Amino acid sequence: MWVFGNPGKEYEKTRHNAGFIVVDEMAKMANIDINKSKFDALVGEYMHNGEKIMLVKPQTYMNLSGESIRKIIDFYKIDLEDLIVIYDDIDIELGKIRIRPSGSPGTHNGMRNITELLGSDKFPRVRMGTSRPPEYMDLKDFVLAKMSDEEWKTFDVAVKNAIKAIDEILANGVRSAMNLYNSNGVVK
């Protein structure tokens, strides 16, 4: 499982680190640390229903995430359908999630880097809604800004639902997770 984000304390709790936030919560729930440094990433591993799960936080910064992912995919010979990428999406309302089995990277530079370096867009992804910036605000400033307390409460619901959706992907596949979570993005 790979996520997008930027390393460093200054990026914690920002919209662009949506993937890191989800994976950090998953690590807490699995009682593991994501602290092994391998392949330009921080990695944590645990067993889930008899399968080894890798939680990966690339340390190459968002727009070069594919470099780290390519190294791990090649080293472990991982099938792309076993990869789940979690990332922020400004085209989805804050607090909503969307799951897809594949697809274009859209305007997301990190996803573009991954699909280019993998030579494919045929891998599952969980998109975390962050909404669009207000008209007066630059996109970069918006995605790198910390969320307000109110926004954080809404986003936290999406984090919990993303974790449930990932569990559903692992247990029953992407289509099942899509059926449960894509209709309105929230299952409580």
Image (tube, helix red, strand yellow):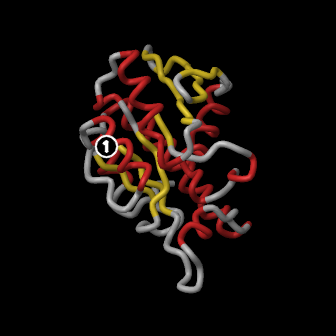
Residue at horizontal 56%, vertical 48%?
160
Q: Position of residue 150 (x, y in %)?
A: 69, 70
In the rendered image, the quadrant that contains the N terminus is top left
Say left or right for 30 vs 51: right
- 187 above or below 30? below
- 21 above or below 35? below
Reading the image, the residue beneath label 1 is 115
Please state which of residues 62 and 177 is positioned toward the viewer in this rendering: 62
Please identify the quarter of the rendering in which residue 101 is found.
top left
Q: Position of residue 5 (x, y in %)?
A: 57, 46
Say left or right for 52 vs 120: right
Q: What amino acid is at disc 1?
A: Thr
Residue at horizontal 55%, vertical 19%?
46
Say left or right for 102 vs 186: left
- 172 above or below 87? above
Please identify the quarter of the rendering in which residue 73 is found.
top left
Residue at horizontal 30%, vertical 40%?
174
Please state which of residues 159 and 107 is positioned toward the viewer in this rendering: 107
Please state which of residues 149 and 171 is positioned toward the viewer in this rendering: 149
Q: Which element type, helix, strand or loop, lies under badge 1?
A: helix
Please identify the quarter of the rendering in which residue 177 is found.
top left
- 76 above or below 84? above
Please state which of residues 49 and 84 is positioned toward the viewer in this rendering: 84
Say left or right for 188 vs 144: left
Q: Position of residue 117 (x, y in %)?
A: 33, 37
Residue at horizontal 54%, vertical 55%?
158
